[in-house]
Amino acid sequence: MLEIRNLTKTYRAQTAVNDLSFTVPDGQVTGFLGPNGAGKSTTMRMAVGLERPTSGEATFDGVPFRKLDNPGRVVGSLLDATWFHPGRSAYQHLAILADLMRLPETRIEECLEAVGLSGVATKRVGGFSLGMKQRLGVACALMGNPKHVLLDEPVNGLDPEGVHWMRERIRALAADGCAVLVSSHLLSEMELTADRLIVVGKGALIAEGTVEEFLSRGKAGTVEVEVLAEDVFRAVGLLEAEGLRVSVVSGGAGSDASSSAAKKALLRVDGAVADDIARLALNNRLLITGLSAKKVSLEDAFLDTTAGSVVYQAN
Ligand SMILES: Nc1ncnc2c1ncn2[C@@H]1O[C@H](COP(=O)(O)OP(=O)(O)OP(=O)(O)O)[C@@H](O)[C@H]1O
């Protein structure tokens, strides 16, 4: 388990990470989310000893990174896939790591095979695409069969097949018992990959919990309500009286009353909970012929939760 305890990082006047604490449990994928500049990369860099915390610490099964005997066998990280030496081949990069970690040469082939780079193993990395570098970065991270894996924006530059591959790879690591921390701006991807989420804003923790908890803590979503066309005005009046925003999607005034579909009207209600609407209708003897809550997406919940923590925003 990775434990982040009261981590703080200050650069001159700027606090990049502010008293941040959270855990990354074994056997699960923990998604690390936050707006640009929220402190995700800085946190990951501090965890693996690339940056010294101003205060606080990160430990892997109780041990700080700098005190690990053979760190590559305990922690694998992909923090920046652009650090590779352009003149060296993929094989040479992995060979250096194998040597450092005292791993057999066979592990190099295994890792190249696992990330689909066997065919270009001897090619200079300078000619690799960003996606190929990401794959090599994953190979480096997984070389030592680590129990903890930290991936900063791992799907950056990957094509759809690569994104799918990365998702499967990340899920497989968690299934093998690893503690996996993954940051990504692709929220739909995180929704498919992560079990738990850590959301940060301006360096501090905003939310920590399962994906389901995060989705349900967001504001109420959009509910579609179908009523008889003759009841439209009454329905809209009742809903608006509750402070809800209502729009008539179809079947309102001016629609063709002769078609059977036109005998019904569809309303879109924002910021609502379906059960509350059903209860309101029942109490007012309004017939509802259809009621469906639109699933709140991770993107909706993220934007909602981090609204007050966005630093860089276009006008
Ligand atoms: N070496 C540094 N010197 C000064 N400020 C820094 C340094 N590294 C990061 N920062 C600042 O710390 C804050 C957090 O940056 P960080 O890269 O950790 O955010 P992030 O959440 O990873 O952002 P993004 O999603 O854009 O990658 C930013 O305001 C950044 O400008």
Image: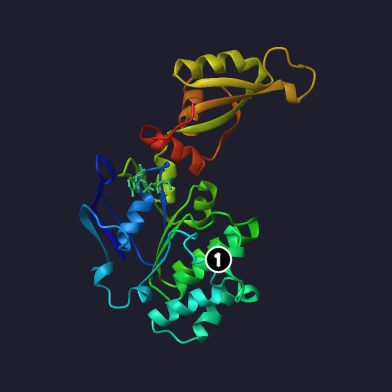
In the shown orientation, is residue 190 left or right of residue 120? left
Q: Position of residue 297 (x, y in %)?
A: 52, 42
Q: Position of residue 205 (x, y in %)?
A: 31, 45
Q: Residue reaching furthest right?
A: 258
Image-quadrant location for residue 295: top right
Q: Say what amino acid the circle numbered 1 marks.
A: Arg
Q: Residue reaching furthest front?
A: 87
Judge whether 63 appears above or below 276 on screen: below
Helix, strand or loop at mark 1: helix
Q: Which residue is mark 1?
A: 135
Q: Position of residue 48 (x, y in %)?
A: 33, 63
Q: Which colour scheme appears in the figure? A: rainbow
Confirm whether residue 86 shows in the render: yes
Q: Residue at x 24, y 43 (%)?
A: 12
Q: Residue at x 46, y 76 (%)?
A: 143
Confirm whether residue 209 shows in the render: no
Q: Residue at x 49, y 60 (%)?
A: 81
